[in-house]
Amino acid sequence: MTQRPAPLALAPAMADQLARFLDSERATRDRSDNTIRAYQADLLSFLAFLGGYHGTPALPGTLGTLTQSDMRAFAAAERGRGFSARSLARRMSAVRSFIRWMSDHHGFDASKALAARSPRFTRSLPRPLAVDQAQNLLDLAAESHPEAWIAARDTAVLTLLYGCGLRISEALQLNGTDWPFRDALIIRGKGAKERQVPVLPVARDAIAEYLRLSPYPLEKDAPLFRGARGQRLNASVLAGAMRRIRQSLGLPPTATPHALRHSFATHLLAAGGDLRTIQELLGHSSLSTTQVYTGVDDAHLLAVYRAAHPRG
């Protein structure tokens, strides 16, 4: 295992630059709070490593002298701590972004540091539910809680995830002012990018039933989906409901709320949907992100072929 040098305290000048970078990412790129926290953890780890590696706290000028060897040493240290290639690639991406930002603001040449390659990793395929599994899950959600309005709420949210391909954060950020839904819903996704998502009647009906049973009145400036005490519904609560449902159905741990978004894309592709349309519906900035679902569809077809072919 690669020995990681003992980290040193972050110099005030570098702490100030890190704070400015994170503020810039939040303001100009509209990064989510989760992304900002991840960037901060990634960069604190990198700067602490540099301090231990060079024997002196990293300063803004230090980044202008970095070489490929420095970057490789950091990558080796992180791998030695057990980081997977995928996690390390994400961490190195944050480091590169910070170095580029520092080079732009301090006028140094970062080409040597940026020339170091990120680790290669194989992108894992999404694990969607089968069509009948998704339907069974939604059916059971309506009976998953002794409080009828909570069961109706969970059903409504899960139906939105599967029927519209929303991220769970996108569904839970909806407010009373978004209701009633029209034929299409305006969703503000990652990077503050807006997209139109068609709303199926079944999703609209599920939300109407939840609102009918809810003990909390619909208020324009209040959350559309509320927790038991009236606050905005937390994603962990929905994840817990999903866990109980999948256990009842004997589904694998990969059957999470986000798997319903994967299921939406995969089932749409299998029904003849084109990648560009699915990209727009999911709010992916790059078509390459959406193309991963073609691998899921191909894998499913191959499994069916092998199971059905007389010589399989």
Image (cartoon, rainbow, N blue to C red):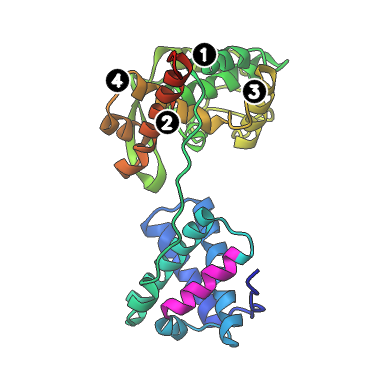
**Considering the numbered disc 3 on the image, is that residue within a helix, a strand or a loop?**
helix
Q: Mark 2 points at which residue?
A: 296
Q: State whether the magenta stretch is mostly helix, strand or loop.
A: helix
**Magenta-highlighted residues:** 67-79
- The amino acid type found where label 2 is placed reads Val
Q: Name the residue under label 4.
A: 272
Residue situated in front as seen by the camera: 180 or 49: 49
> Mark 1 or mark 2: which comes first in sequence?
1
- The amino acid type found where label 3 is placed reads Arg
Q: Residue at x 51, y 82 (%)?
A: 13
Q: How far apart are marks 1 and 3 (CA)?
A: 13 Å
**Considering the numbered disc 4 on the image, is that residue within a helix, a strand or a loop?**
loop
Q: Name the residue under label 1.
A: 132
> Mark 4 or mark 1: which comes first in sequence?
1
Residue situated in front as seen by the camera: 211 or 152: 152
**Residue 246, label in figure:** 3
Residue situated in front as seen by the camera: 305 or 64: 305
Q: Distance between the residues labelled 1 and 2?
A: 17 Å
The answer to whether one can see residue 176 in this image is: no
- The amino acid type found where label 4 is placed reads Gly
